[in-house]
């Protein structure tokens, strides 16, 4: 059976090749681990030295907030009022009581609440990008500063941003 013996030979030589490559793999692997652990330690040290990101850090762009304002007037103002002062139909979204209520929460909590329950009666009808625009408008209305980049419409990114009633260090 010539076919079968040829197959066995091929497998054997293949196995030899794998075995001889192993020491190289483990050498490269341990070097890679060293490089990675140094990189991780460096990144962690950098993050600890930085101030935490809050709503005072300029986490949305002015353009994004302006887009959110148009959307808010169309979809939300009927209940929350154009100036967000609220009324019989809905609570205020601007002013000290609102900011105090949300103080210390991650922006992700506000994002989740909006996506799940607003606009009331048509819940979840907007895109993540539109909810992010609305949050930008709410932040702007509450006196938080705009920054160079738009607020990302991702839950993970918003988990890293805290709503802070007072500017840290003030
Ligand atoms: C039909 C009326 C109505 C519309 C339209 C509406 N809301 Fe609301 N909203 C409410 C009511 C009522 C509440 C109070 C909580 C509840 O009943 O779910 C609320 C609560 C909220 C809250 C939580 C406030 C807090 O401090 O807990 C946010 C944020 C919010 N709305 C944002 C929006 C946004 C953004 C839109 C537009 C996309 C919108 N709402 C559209 C009626 C409305």
Image (spheres, helix red, strand yellow):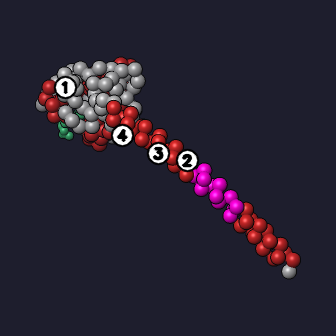
* Residue hosting label 2: 32
- Would residue 117 be counted in the magenta stretch? no
User: Which of the two labelled residues, at mark 4 and mark 3, occupies the earlier sequence position?
Assistant: 3
Seen as rendered, the residue at the extreme right is 2
User: Up-down: is 135 above or below 154?
Assistant: above
Which of the 4 quarters of the picture holds residue 148?
Answer: top left
Give the label on residue 37, or none: 3
Which label lies toward us, 4 or 3? Answer: 3
Q: CA distance from mark 2 to mark 1?
A: 44 Å
Residue 15 in the image, given as x and y percentages of width and height = 71, 67
* Residue hosting label 4: 155
User: Which of the two labelled residues, at mark 3 and mark 2, occupies the earlier sequence position?
Assistant: 2
Find out whether the residues at labels 4 and 2 contact each other: C-beta distance under 8 Å: no
* Residue hosting label 1: 166
Badge 1 marks a residue whose secondary structure is loop
In the rendered image, the quadrant that contains the N terminus is bottom right
Residue 100 in the image, given as x and y percentages of width and height = 15, 31
Residue at 44% across / 42% down in the picture?
A: 40
Residue 169 in the image, given as x and y percentages of width and height = 21, 24
Q: Which residues are magenta?
A: 18-29
Residue at 42% across / 41% down in the picture?
A: 41
Q: Residues within 10 Å of mark 1 (few under 14, many from 20)?
A: few
């Amino acid at each position: 059976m010539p076919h079968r013996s040829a197959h066995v030979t091929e497998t054997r030589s293949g196995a030899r090749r794998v075995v001889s490559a192993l020491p190289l793999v483990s050498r490269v692997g341990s070097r890679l681990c060293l490089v990675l652990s140094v990189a991780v330690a460096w990144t962690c040290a950098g993050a600890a030295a930085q101030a935490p990101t809050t709503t005072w850090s300029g986490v949305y762009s002015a353009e994004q907030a302006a887009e959110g304002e148009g959307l808010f007037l169309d979809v939300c103002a009927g209940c929350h009022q154009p100036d967000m002062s609220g009324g019989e139909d809905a609570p205020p979204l601007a002013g000290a009581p609102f900011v105090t209520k949300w103080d210390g929460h991650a922006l992700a909590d506000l994002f989740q609440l909006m996506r799940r329950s607003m606009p009331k009666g048509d819940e979840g009808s907007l895109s993540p990008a539109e909810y992010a625009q609305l949050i930008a408008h709410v932040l702007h209305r509450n006196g938080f500063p705009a920054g160079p980049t738009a607020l990302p419409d991702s839950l993970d990114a918003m988990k890293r941003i805290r709503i802070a009633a007072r500017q840290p260090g003030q």
